[in-house]
Amino acid sequence: MRAASPLPEPDEAARAQSAAVVAAVHRAIDAAGGWIPLERYMQLVLYAPGLGYYAAGARKFGAQGDFVTAPEMTPLFARTLSRPLARMLDRADARDVLELGAGSGAMAAGLIDTWRAQGGPPVRYRILEVSPDLRARQQARLAAHESVEWIDALPERIDGVVLMNEVLDAVPPRLIVRDAGRWLERGVRWNGGLQLEDRVLADEALRAVAQERFPPDVDYASELNPAAEALVQSIGERMQSGALVMIDYGFPQHEYYHPQRSTGTLMGHYRHRAHADPFLWPGLSDLTAHVDFTAMALAAERAGLVIEAFVSLAAFLVAAGIADELAAVGDATSQAFVREAAAVQRLVSPAEMGELFKVMLAARDGDGIVLPNIAEMDRAHRL
């Protein structure tokens, strides 16, 4: 059952929406014989057509939503990112950008406007968005940008840059448990309400992966995300030239599966507050898990890509010139400068996004991504 929470209560319409999501989950549990893995639960509450968090009409981004992503915080993020992306596009066979999960469309608008103002690389900007609601919002925001098109599946051939900003954390993972030497999978059953329950892990391949990654000889629960790994590998296999840019919160494997992180990384976001209750207002609350960047690197390498860099978000933005973009705002005493400086501080501060968020760059055949001063900050050797 959902525990009582001090978080803001949703209004009557939102409560009805959440009740419809719970009913859909209940039906899925009954159809599956009384239990579904947590991965399936997350797929339903996040992506069920017309019901899930990313598929219904609730506001997700910004002050009135549940969280704020970097492109919504400040236009300087996209302007700064445009610099290394332009270098990557210059080295690809086509100046195309493919953004997965484009959110509000702020990143796309910022990049295209920056390149247009600077006479930068002409691009075809494609967006692959699984949420019909978000696609509609993106289309409204980007209506004046004739270079943008929306696609429904990964292209068979990719040349250019693939951009994933806070996408991998939203791919539902499997949650595996080792309890007194027994291997289990965490899932959801119905017992007068939604309830977590661990059952014997039937997938031997997944068990082998967990056994390899989990710390030995302790009870432990954490996520594995074969779906996210498959997505990265599939992109890599299609990429003939160019680079894949992954921006997300997470850790290399030795930190992800640290003995002290024994309950996993699954978390919810509701009204700008983090919580640990997967049953808090299903369909209204976002659910995510941190990214295992070592697993993503290995998936990219299986597809023949080369890991060019793995750095903190702060290091990446500083190397890419965010200080110059901030200085270009103008008078340091103006309200505009103070506002943007506060946002930049959130992006680069180790206590905010600067250290938890990472940037991984993977290229086809070591295309040589050039970013000044990035080598001295690269952490790829720690993967």
Image (cartoon, rainbow, N blue to C red):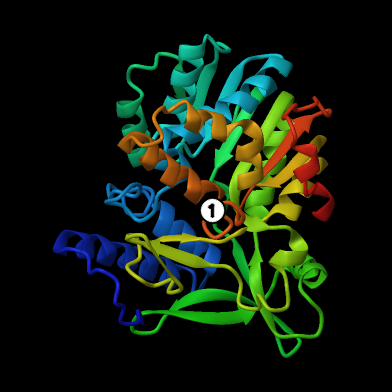
Report the residue that reaches farthest toward the left: 12
Residue 137 visible to an observer of this rendering: yes
Screen quadrant of the C terminus: bottom right
The residue closer to the viewer here, 130 or 257, is 257
Please state the horizontal and vertical placement of residue 63, each as a whole percent of the image: 30, 50
Disc 1 residue type (three-letter): Met
Q: On screen, 224 above or below 30?
A: above
Residue drawn 40% across the image and 49% down it? 68
Q: In which quarter of the image is the N terminus?
A: bottom left
Could you tell me residue 231's position as x and y percent? 64, 43
Task: Please give the count of numbered marks on the rendered protein.
Answer: 1
| x 72%, y 69%: residue | 257
Decide if residue 64 is on the left or right side of residue 1. Answer: left
Left or right, residue 379 beside residue 105: right
Q: Is mark 1 on a helix, strand or loop?
A: loop
Question: Residue at the spot x=69%, y=50% of the render?
Answer: 229
Quarter of the view holding residue 10? bottom left
Residue 152 visible in this rendered orientation of the protein: no
Left or right: 272 as drawn, with respect to 162: left
Q: In the rendered image, which residue does mark 1 sit on? A: 353
> Which residue ends up furthest to the bottom in the rendered image?
180
The part of the image, by quadrant, that contains residue 138 is top left
In this rendering, the answer to whether 181 lies above or below 365 is below
Query: How busy is the neighbourhood of tag 1: few (under 14 within 10 Å), some, or many (20 plus)?
Result: many
Q: Where 273 falls versus 52 (above or below)?
A: below
Residue 326 place in picture, x, y as percent: 48, 33
Q: Which of 158 and 381 is in front in this view?
A: 381
Horizontal and vertical percent position of residue 368: 80, 26
